[in-house]
Structures are given as structure tokens and as C-alpha cells.
Image (cartoon, rainbow, N blue to C red):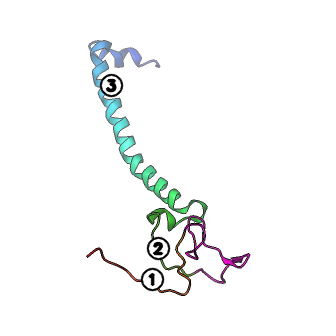
Amino acid sequence: LGPHAPALLGCIPSFASALPLLGAAATYRRWQMVRASSAIVGERMNRLQRLADGRAAAADVPEGAVLAWRPPGTQQYVHGRLQAPAGYAVCDGTNGTPDLTGRFILGASAR
């Protein structure tokens, strides 16, 4: 502790009486750190989830939703089929999707 430890420890009536105070201070400090870092960690985790593997938009879209999509740049075809980004499927009647080839997507209402 150093040469001044006896003087510092002499200010505390007893070590046992200081434990609750030290415990409360440590708990409060830990809570401050967790509170501050949880917002940062949460924000980073959300960003990573959205950006990982090129699935930026797929992370926020409910499964089964039909959306208009325009491929950036030139369209990518593999074996004559348009390729969608990871996490998406082209609605061309394959893989359980409806065939919307040549159709226009129009919103609907439950009323």
C-alpha cells in the first residue's frame, strides 16, 4: 500500500465498517459502466447484425414480405436466374416464392 497506508487506514474506524461503503461504491461504478457501455454495445450489435454478410436491409424486413428491389449496377444472373442479395429471394416461382415476373407490386389492405 505504501508508506502512507497506516495514516490512510487510520481514518477508517474499522475495515469492517468500510466494506458496505466500498461495496456500494464499486456496485455504483459497475452500474455506470454497464449502463454506458450497454447502449454502445447494443448499437454496435444492431449495426453488425444489419451489415453482416451483406444483409443490411434483410435484417429489418419481416420474413415473407414482398418488396420491390432494383439491383445496383448490372444485374447478376446465374444459370439464367436473377440473383438476389443474401437473405432475399427473387419472386420467380422457385423456392416457394410466388411468381411475380412481369407484375407490379401493389399494397393491400385488410379492410
Q: Using the image as rendered, state which of residue 25 and residue 73 is in the foreground.
A: 73
Frontmost residue, 79 versus 68:
79
Residue type indicated by callout 1: Ile
Name which residue lies at 31% across and 30% down.
25
State yes or no: discs 1 and 2 in contact (Cβ < 8 Å).
Answer: yes
Give the residue pinned by disc 2.
66
Cα separation, mark 1 vs mark 2, equals 8 Å
Residue 32 location, x and y as percent? 34, 41
Quarter of the view holding residue 13: top left
User: Circles 1 and 3: CB distance less than 8 Å?
Assistant: no
**Residue 19 has which mark?**
none
Q: Is residue 72 magenta?
A: yes
Front-most of residues 52 and 86:
86
Determine whether the residue tagged by mark 2 lies in a helix, strand or loop. Answer: loop
Q: In this rendering, is residue 111 above or below 55?
A: below
Give the x, y percent position of residue 29: 35, 36
- Is 93 magenta? The answer is yes
- Residue 72 screen position, x and y as percent: 60, 80
- The percent coordinates of residue 26 (x first, y second) are 35, 30
Q: On the image, numbered disc 3 is attached to which residue? A: 23
The disc at residue 105 is 1
Label 3 sits on a secondary structure element that is helix
Nearer to us: label 1 or label 3: 1
Q: Residues within 10 Å of mark 3 (few under 14, many from 20)?
A: few
